[in-house]
Amino acid sequence: MLLPSINARHYFGGIHTAVQLYRALEKHFPATRIVLVDSAPDAAALERFSEHTLVDCAADSAASHQIVPFNDRYGRTVPVGAGDCWLTTAWWTTYSAQRLAAWQQQQFGAAGRLINLIQDFEPGFYPWSSQFALALSTYRPDQDVGVFNTRLLADYFELQGLAYQHRFVFEPTLNDGLRHVLEQARAKSQPRQRRMVVYARPSTPRNSFELLCEALRTWGWSDPASAQWEVVAAGELTADLDLGPFRVHALGKLDLPDYARLLATSAIGVSLMISPHPSYPPLEMAAFGMGVVTNRFANKDLGNFSPNIRSAEQFSPEAIAAAIAQEVNEWERRKMSPLGLMGEDHAFLAEGGFDEVAKQIAHSWHCDNREKLK
Amino acid sequence: MLLPSINARHYFGGIHTAVQLYRALEKHFPATRIVLVDSAPDAAALERFSEHTLVDCAADSAASHQIVPFNDRYGRTVPVGAGDCWLTTAWWTTYSAQRLAAWQQQQFGAAGRLINLIQDFEPGFYPWSSQFALALSTYRPDQDVGVFNTRLLADYFELQGLAYQHRFVFEPTLNDGLRHVLEQARAKSQPRQRRMVVYARPSTPRNSFELLCEALRTWGWSDPASAQWEVVAAGELTADLDLGPFRVHALGKLDLPDYARLLATSAIGVSLMISPHPSYPPLEMAAFGMGVVTNRFANKDLGNFSPNIRSAEQFSPEAIAAAIAQEVNEWERRKMSPLGLMGEDHAFLAEGGFDEVAKQIAHSWHCDNREKLK
């Protein structure tokens, strides 16, 4: 597996999911290694992979589970075997692995299978530019295996003319750390506080923090009900924010139990995501019986995911403000009684993780390999 | 018309085209004004609009042609009449005019018609973000008139689900300043020099300068013929660039006659554009009988524009390098004799400008207006 980093400060959702998939695939292969292309692992990170051996990229080690730092690589190479196959994550890891596979083709007559774990349409993280173009060039739907985080994203790729011939899809599920509080809330339904939770991540452009603020400001000036509501920001905001009509109270990054209790006692959530990927916060808020305002994007309309989610039709501040006002109005009308919590049979609440998809991927890989060895 | 600026240092292709359209529309309307939203006009700019009166935004002037600086607008407003209609250019001018038109609707019972001059898919200039979302929100295909610079771009909008009900399309034509040298070259065909002209604009991400350099480097290391070729950069590059296998000779920004002579004596052009808009350089190079290497994008394949243009299928450095190598190979095989110059009946060589499209737009506007006044 090629991965940017396993250090705690880079260990967000995307890398966590990649490691989960790697763990589930491990048992199907005689030997595995993680090649780290952006950051060398620190001691705490290596402890989380205690059954792995730290291997210098110049060494030809026989250890069956290796961690190979390859961030400091000027003039250096990493050994590659004929049977090596590749699990790639961020687009620049795919870009590198595709060139490693081309080298296998030259040296050994066959390129190793490349399994591309796709968790967003990464060209969208850039303006139209060289980076956009190179990220786009890593999608080879006729050659590589695509493993998609959500069907929504897989469908978006098809809409872009990127239909992977070999494709696997998995769906997001609720973080285990939130389940306990959800079950408590399910057992005892109480009216919610007049509290709106907004997901504020100014450092992540696709969470469109500025548009969120403009929409809140527009709602605040136009809806008299706004004076009765408390607005709190979960995510990254560390100082309160004066929007004019009201202040947003910054909660910073909450630990999981606090986050769960916030969702279980609040009424409305607002979380934007300019991407076909659903992102977790609107799904989590909906699971806890909150009324959620979010945006559509191409084929994405999370109203299909839960009746608790309202997708604004437009990206304009006015359209998002109107959706918030409607949601507020319905909570007032219902006297703050919560919406239905997510049913226990909803796919988002399923447990079990990556074992099934890993089995399928490994099976497909072994078939492909037998074919090549014939 | 809402325009960012008319000052020389902002006066690139997009603004020039907007002014040409405005000039052609002027005669169909009793009064016109240019509202400048980003930069106040300097003396030289005002001289180019000598029949226009400079009007302060607070004034209610009766002058029939006005220039209204509105860049410094904190706490200020601009007078708007019931019959005013809007010609918008950059997406933030459209964003503003849509709110002015909503104000007309409130005040007068009818919003003025909004004519959106669309010269690129502007959300693509940003990563997925608030700016992307707001730019996208300005496309209202059910409400506004779309005037598209090229059918390719108009078709791309349709592919994105943005099919304007009222739509006008115009095509790019050769700059008049290049015509004389083109006719000279047509009269006397001579073998070309082993010179490759690359379009280098590091400041414009969608011209993907980094990808251009990587492709040239890849070609330089892999194709022995590269040692015989001179590579020069037109556009913005002011210092020579050592790519490893060879140096790129920087020509900086050329004036039109020098640019035309360069095209008339060189063999190969390389110009990338990560957008459905064709951009002018590959069309100009092809008109002068050069062999052009460029990229595809969504529905864009400039091979349909001229047989002299070769569109690389992929964005990878290797794919673009391979297209360059093929082109070099064919020039060597032809002993440097030029490709056919563009036929005089090709639409790119048409003259006449914006009169016809302006007439249609004005006609449509006047019909719409009569309808409203009924």
Image (cartoon, coloured by chain):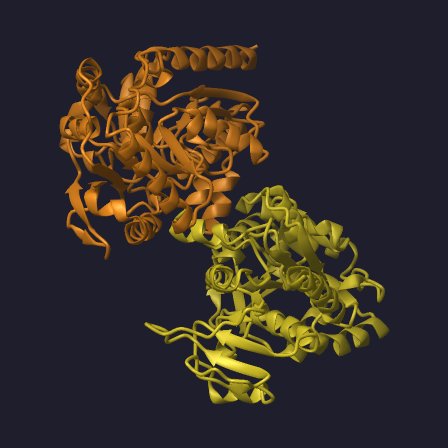
Chain colours: A yellow, B orange
Image quarter (top left, top right, bottom left or bottom right) of the N terminus of chain B: top left
Q: How many marks?
A: 0
Where's residue B56, x and y in %?
A: 26, 31
Closer to the camera, B317 or B29?
B317
Q: In the visual, does A13 lie left or right of B45?
A: right
Q: Is residue B140 visible?
A: no
Q: Left or right: A370 with respect to B371?
A: right
Q: Is residue A199 above or below residue B237?
A: below
Q: Residue drawn 46% across and 71% down?
A: A239
User: Which residue occupies 48% across, 44% down?
Assistant: B134
Image spot of residue B139 (x, y percent): 51, 34
Residue B263 in sight here: yes
Looking at the image, which residue is at 57% across and 28% down?
A: B163
Residue B179 drawn above or below residue A344: above
Farthest-out residue, front: A374
Q: Is residue A43 left or right of residue B280?
A: right
Image quadrant in which you'd find residue A24: bottom right
* Quarter that holds the C terminus of chain B: top right
- In the image, residue B178 sits, relative to residue A160, either above or below, namely above
- Residue A59: where, in percent of width, then height? 44, 83
User: Closer to the camera, B210 or A272?
Assistant: B210
Quarter of image, res A120: bottom right
State whether residue A362 is above or below residue B113: below
Camera-side residue of B268 and A202: B268
- Where does the image place residue B234, in percent across and percent down from the top left? 21, 39
